[in-house]
Structure formats: structure tokens, C-alpha cells
Amino acid sequence: MQPYTLIRRQRKTLAMKLDKDGNITVIAPLYLPQLEIEAFILAHTDWLTKKRAELAAKNPLPSLTLSEGEKIPFFGKEYALYFWSKRSVKVQQDYIYLPKANAKNALISFYRKALKEYILSKIPDYAQTMGVQPTKIRINSARTRWGSCSVNDALNFSYHLVMCDQFAVQYVVIHELCHILHKNHSQAFWNTVAAYCPDYKAAKHYLKQKLYYMEIL
Ligand SMILES: [Zn+2]
């Protein structure tokens, strides 16, 4: 049973609410048996999960502090930070090893490099099947958009994208490559996106939930 705060009142029906921290309060009639109250909460499990996800999206995590043990996302998985004496950055099992001095810059340059390598490994195949050729691939520090395509077909990707699951990164790559064919978000553009990325709607939804990644580092 999920923990909850119970308030009993002179009323006929049950009501439930979540506060901004995701805590449950149930308002129940004075003599309603506890079993019925808990059955009511159980019956609303899906509703609670959905509401909590909405809250999480609305109340983003504060910025990363880059302290030892802190969980940080990398390609959709959480890793614990671990400081070591070397200057390099390494990902191994559940850990990201970071130098203590200049940790933030070290992490960002590692993220930029990892994202660029991943994108460069994907582009040739996509570009060939789609019959397009980007003029340049750049990684930037954008905080308002995951990717963009310039008028002369240079593609830019925000390093924050590296925190996202690979299926979402692939979608952003396809999205920007499609802008080489369509410099807008017309129906024709979305049809092309759908042809190369059938689950693009799930990726768009996922990226909306992860917008706060652009604020935390
Ligand atoms: Zn676009």
C-alpha cells in the first residue's frame, strides 16, 4: 500500500489528491472502513502514476551538483558519479568516473564527444536511405532545442541530448535530416519523419518529459 494521509469528514464520497511533492491525501466519509479506502487508492494506481509523471515534468530536478554518488543520465540510463585521480572520463558499469578538478567541464566535453560519435555513427546510413547530405554536424550548448538544421543544411545538436535514450536521439537525427528535404514542419515533413522513424510520436513525448535535462547541466 502506498503511504497516504487520511482526513475524515462528514461527507458521502471518497476524494484523493496529490500535493506538489507527490504525497497522497485521501478525504473519506467518517465511518468508511479502511479496507474500502485502500481499495480506492489501489483502483487509482494508474491515475497516480500519470499524475506523478506530470508533476515530475512540471517540477524539474534542480541543477546537478556533481557530487560523488550523484545520479546522472547518459543515453537514457542513470550512472552514479565517482571521482578518480585521472584526468579522463570513463563510463563503466553503473558509474561515470570523473576527475575532481574541473569536473563540470570534463563531463560536458565527454558528453559532447560521446554524442558526436554516436550521431556520426548513425548519419551515413540514414543520409544514404533518405538521399540527403548534411554539410556539417555540430554539437552546441542549446537549451531551447535538441537540434536544428540551418539554411545550408548544417545540423546542430545540443549536448544535452546525450542524456536521452538512444531511440529519442535517433528521432532527433532523423528529424533534422528531414529538414534538409523540408525546411518547415508541414504535413509532408511529418510524413517523411514517420517513414524513417515510425515511433516518432513516442520519441516526441519522451523528449517533452526530458526538457529539464537542458537546465540541469
Ligand atoms: Zn524541426
Image (tube, helix red, strand yellow):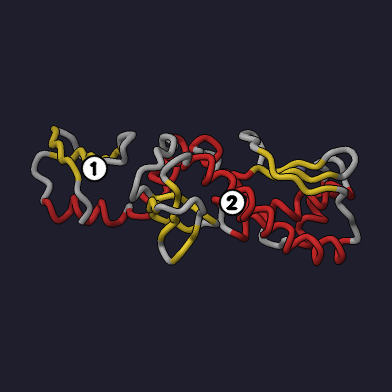
Decide: few, some or many residues near mark 2? Use Cα within 10 Å; few <14, some 14-19, many ≥20: many
User: Foreground residue, 137 or 147?
Assistant: 137
N-term mark: 2 or 1: 1
Name the secondary structure under disc 2.
helix
Amino acid type, label 1: Leu
Q: Is residue 115 left or right of residue 6?
A: right
Q: Quadrant of ligand 1?
A: top right
Residue 169 in percent (x, y) is at 65, 55
Vertical comparison of 180 with 127: above or below: above
- Please name which of the two marks, 2 or 1, marks the residue nearer to the observer: 2
| Outermost residue to the left | 31
- In this view of the protein, which residue sits in the foreground, 110 or 17? 110
Locate residue 2, reporting x and y percent: 22, 52
Which residue position is annotated with label 2? 162
Quarter holding residue 138: top right
121 left or right, relative to 93: right
The residue that label 1 is drawn on is 14
123 lies left or right of 27: right
For the residue with label 1, is its CB less than 8 Å from the closest atom of ligand 1?
Answer: no
Give the residue at x 19% y 53%. Answer: 38
How far apart marks 2 and 1 lie (CA) works out to 44 Å
Asked whether 50 or 28 is in front, the reply is 50
- Which residue shows up at 30% across the image and 38% down it? 17
> In the figure, residue 51 lies in which quadrant?
top left
Give the residue drawn at x 62%, y 60%.
167
Q: Residues within 10 Å of mark 1 (few under 14, many from 20)?
A: some
Identified at 50% across, 54% down, the residue is: 89
Instruction: Quarter of the image for the N terminus: give it.
Output: bottom left
Q: Amino acid at mark 2?
A: Val
Which secondary structure lies at badge 1?
A: loop
